[in-house]
Image: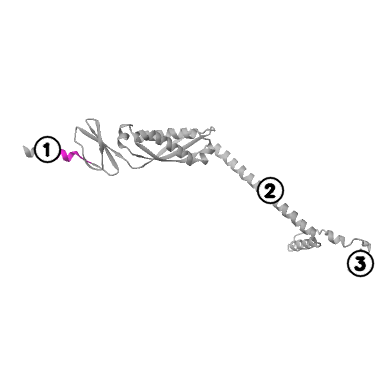
Amino acid sequence: MIIGLVVFILFIILISIRQVSEYERGIKFRFGKFKKIMKPGWNIVLPIIESYRKVDIRTKAVDVPEQDAITKDNVSIRINAVIYYKVFDASKAILAVERYQYAVGQLAQTTMRNAVGAVSLDELLSERDKISTEICKVIDKATDPWGIKVENVELKDVKLPEEMQRVIAKVAEAEREKEAVITKSRGEKEAADNLAKAATVLSSSPGALHLRTLSTLNDLSSDQSNTIIFAVPIEVLRAFDGTDMTKVVEKVKNIKK
C-alpha cells in the first residue's frame, strides 16, 4: 500500500515538472487564479488544479503591413514599418491584454496612420527618423500597461502614386536648373570682373594690347581652317598720325614691285 502511494506520488511529480527556458517566463494559475511568475528552470505544475502559460521575453521584430494614409497636405501614400518590442512584465502581458502580439500590431498600424496624417509629405520624406521616434513614444506609452516595452520603430518604405512621383521629379529638375543658372551667372559675373581688370591693365601699358593681339593671332594660326579678320590696334593707327597716307600707299606699291 505504501509502495503504491509512493509510486503514485512520484508519478504525479514527474508529470508535474515543467521546464521554463532562460528566455521565457511562466505564468502559473491555481484554480484559475494568478499564482506567481515561474522563473527559468524546472517548476512544479500540479495537474488539474494548476495550469501555466509561457511568455517569450526576447525582443521581437514585427513587420507592420502596408497602410494607406493621407498626409497633412492631402497626398495619398502607402507606408510600412517594422516595430521592435519586448515583454518586461509577463504577468501583465497575459492578464491585461488578450493576444498581445496582435494588439501591438494593430496599435502600431493605427498610430502610424495618425502620425502620417499629422505631417506633410516633405516632412515625412525629410524627417523620417524624427517621425519614427514620435511613433515609438506613442506606442510605448500605450503598451506600458500591458507590460510591453517598445524599443524602436522604423519606417521602411514610403510609396507615392506615379503622378506624384512625376511631379516631384519635375520639382527636382527645376531646382537643378535654377542652381545651374545661378552658378552660370556667378561665373559670368566673375569673368566680367576679371576682364574689366585685364582691360584696365592693358590700357595702362603702352603696346600691351598690340602684344595681346599678336598672341591671339598666333593661337588662331595653329588651325588652318580658321579665317582671321585682323583688326588693327589703336596703337598701330596712332603711329600714322600726321602722316600723308598717299605717300605710305605709294611706298607699299614700290616695295611690292
Q: Residues within 10 Å of mark 3 (few under 14, many from 20)?
A: few
Q: Residues within 10 Å of mark 1 (few under 14, many from 20)?
A: few
Quadrant housing the N terminus = top left
Real-space Cα separation, disc 2 to disc 3, in angstroms: 52 Å
Which of the 4 quarters of the picture holds residue 244? Answer: bottom right
Is 158 placed left or right of 147 in the picture? right
Quadrant housing the C terminus = bottom right
- Residue located beneath label 3 in the image: 251
Residue type at mark 3?
A: Lys
Real-space Cα separation, disc 3 to disc 1, in angstroms: 144 Å
Is 6 placed left or right of 32 in the picture? left
Real-space Cα separation, disc 2 to disc 1, in angstroms: 98 Å
**Where in the figure is residue 198, as x and y percent of width and height?**
75, 57
Q: What stretch of residues is rendered in magenta? A: 7-18
Classify 186 as above or below 125.
below
Q: Counting residues from the N terminus, which is met first, the one under dot 3 or under dot 1?
A: 1
- Residue located beneath label 2 in the image: 185
Label 1 SS: helix
Residue 53 lies within the magenta run: no
The disc at residue 122 is none
Residues at discs 2 and 1 in contact (Cβ within 8 Å): no
Residue type at mark 1?
A: Phe
Q: Measuring 6% from the left and 38% from the top, which residue is drawn there?
A: 2
**Where in the figure is residue 217, as x and y percent of width and height?**
77, 62
- Residue located beneath label 1 in the image: 8
Q: How many marks?
A: 3
Q: Counting residues from the N terminus, which is met first, the one under dot 2 or under dot 3?
A: 2
Label 3 SS: helix
Q: Measuring 35% from the left and 34% from the top, which residue is drawn there?
A: 146
Is residue 148 visible in the rendered structure shown here?
yes
Classify 201 as above or below 81.
below
Q: Counting residues from the N terminus, which is met first, the one under dot 2 or under dot 1?
A: 1
